[in-house]
């Protein structure tokens, strides 16, 4: 049994390094059970920060899987596996449900925070997907403006016209759309221009490399210019230090997300982080405004 074999040797199971087909099948079965079980899959939230004013512009919801015997399984390991099967549909529905309910709880607390959910290509190929999203928003009572969807370029490419129709329906209803991991995969300026998106997220690999690599710095600068010329808000992922913040601010990047500000964290922890962050930025603003 996969579970018993792995449990004693590893803390974090990585199916990407497990070539045993039977193990992968069994893990898919575990994932299917996890979606039904409701206690293994949770969302962590990571803030996005406005680089000019320091304001929190929203959060990204990132799935976490804690298996009782396998330990943590990283999303990069099981999401692609789920995407290659129909399991990605119930998984996405589950994530959307959790994220929309959390966004509603924040709105009810008086701190409305837009929540971004990552989407898989399969969902965009479902003609009924947009209606599913609208039904959920309606049932929970969340304003459309508080939901954002992040899509990866390479995903959309498989059937651009079908995906485009779904995206247009979502966008025209007021759901904001973001192109994730820009610069990787089958990047195409034509598609970027064609898709009704509001935001461009520069992949963290370029942001992390830009301090030491001229080529990566050029790519980041070019992506910011391109995004702005298309009227998009530009987000840098993987912002880990002060140097990156300063460089991105100098380049006119709009929003930053990364460990420098906060790691993805459970909702309750995010609440505490937000209180702390707000008081720190108040103090900083106050100190800056006070003549010495
Ligand atoms: P992504 O959407 O590009 O998410 C950003 C990833 O970068 C997250 O990894 C996040 O934890 C990580 N990250 C954030 N800041 C930093 C930083 O400063 N440095 C570094 N090194 N990493 C940072 P995570 O949570 O492991 O997720 C990996 C990918 O899995 C996501 O990439 C997304 O494509 C996918 N994913 C996660 N949750 C979901 C989900 O609910 N549904 C779908 N379809 N995909 C998901
Ligand atoms: Mg994302
Ligand atoms: Mg990304
Ligand atoms: Mg990614």
Image: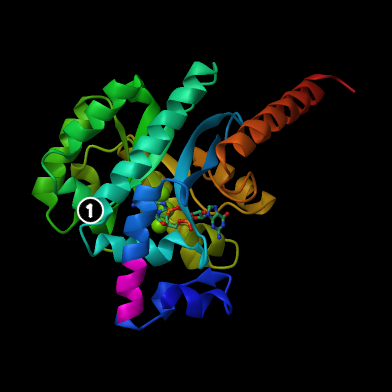
| Residue 224, horizontal then vertical, whole percent | 42, 46
Say above or below: 19 vs 112: below
| Residue 41, horizontal then vertical, whole percent | 45, 50
Say above or below: 129 vs 210: above
| Local crowd size for mark 1, using a 10 Å CA cut-off: few (<14), some (14–19), many (≥20) | many
Say above or below: 30 vs 135: below
Q: How many marks?
A: 1
Q: Quadrant of the N terminus?
A: bottom left
Q: Quadrant of the C terminus?
A: top right
Side of 228 relative to 287 (left or right)? left
| Residue 210, horizontal then vertical, whole percent | 54, 61
Side of 24 relative to 57 (left or right)? left
Q: Is label 1 in a helix, a strand or a loop? A: helix
Q: Is mark 1 within 8 Å of ligand 1?
A: no
Range drawn in magenta: 22-28
Find out whether residue 26 is within the magenta segment.
Answer: yes
Find out whether residue 92 is within the magenta segment.
Answer: no
The quarter of the picture where residue 208 lies is: bottom right
Q: Point out the residue furthest to the right here.
A: 292
Asked if residue 29 shows in the view, the reply is yes
**Front position in the image: 88 or 201:** 88
| Residue 35, horizontal then vertical, whole percent | 35, 50
Asked if residue 184 shows in the view, the reply is no
Residue depicted at 36% across the width and 22% down the height: 142
Side of 115 relative to 268 (left or right)? left
Q: Which residue is denoted by mark 1 in the rendering?
A: 121
Colouring used for the render: rainbow
**Front position in the image: 151 or 44:** 44
Residue depicted at 19% across the width and 39% down the height: 167
Side of 81 relative to 237 (left or right)? left
What secondary structure do most residues of the magenta stretch adopt? helix
Q: Point out the residue furthest to the bottom here.
A: 20
């Amino acid at each position: 049994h996969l579970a018993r074999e792995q449990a004693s040797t590893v803390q974090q199971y990585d199916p990407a390094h497990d070539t045993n087909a039977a193990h992968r099948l069994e893990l898919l079965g575990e994932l299917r059970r996890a979606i039904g079980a409701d206690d293994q899959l949770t969302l962590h939230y990571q803030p996005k920060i406005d680089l000019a004013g320091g304001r929190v512009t929203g959060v990204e919801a990132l799935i976490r899987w804690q298996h009782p015997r396998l330990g943590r399984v990283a999303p990069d390991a099981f999401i692609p596996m789920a995407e290659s099967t129909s399991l990605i549909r119930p998984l996405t529905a589950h994530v959307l449900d959790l994220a929309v309910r959390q966004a509603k709880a924040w709105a009810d607390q008086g701190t409305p925070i837009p929540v971004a959910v990552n989407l898989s290509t399969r969902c965009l190929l479902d003609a009924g997907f947009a209606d599913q999203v609208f039904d959920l928003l309606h049932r929970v009572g969340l304003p459309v403006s508080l939901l954002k969807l992040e899509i990866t370029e390479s995903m959309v490419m498989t059937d651009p016209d079908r995906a485009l129709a779904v995206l247009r329906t979502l966008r025209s209803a007021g759901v904001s759309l973001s192109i994730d991991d820009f610069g990787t995969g089958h990047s195409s300026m034509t598609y970027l221009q064609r898709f009704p998106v509001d935001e461009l997220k520069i992949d963290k690999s370029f942001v992390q490399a830009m301090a030491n690599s001229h080529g990566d710095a050029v790519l980041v600068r070019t992506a910011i210019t391109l995004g702005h010329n298309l009227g998009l808000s530009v987000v840098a992922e993987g912002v880990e230090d002060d140097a990156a913040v300063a460089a991105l601010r100098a380049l006119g990047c709009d929003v930053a997300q990364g460990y420098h500000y906060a790691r993805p964290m459970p909702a309750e922890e995010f609440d505490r982080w937000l209180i702390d962050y707000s008081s720190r930025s108040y103090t900083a603003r106050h100190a800056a405004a006070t003549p010495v």
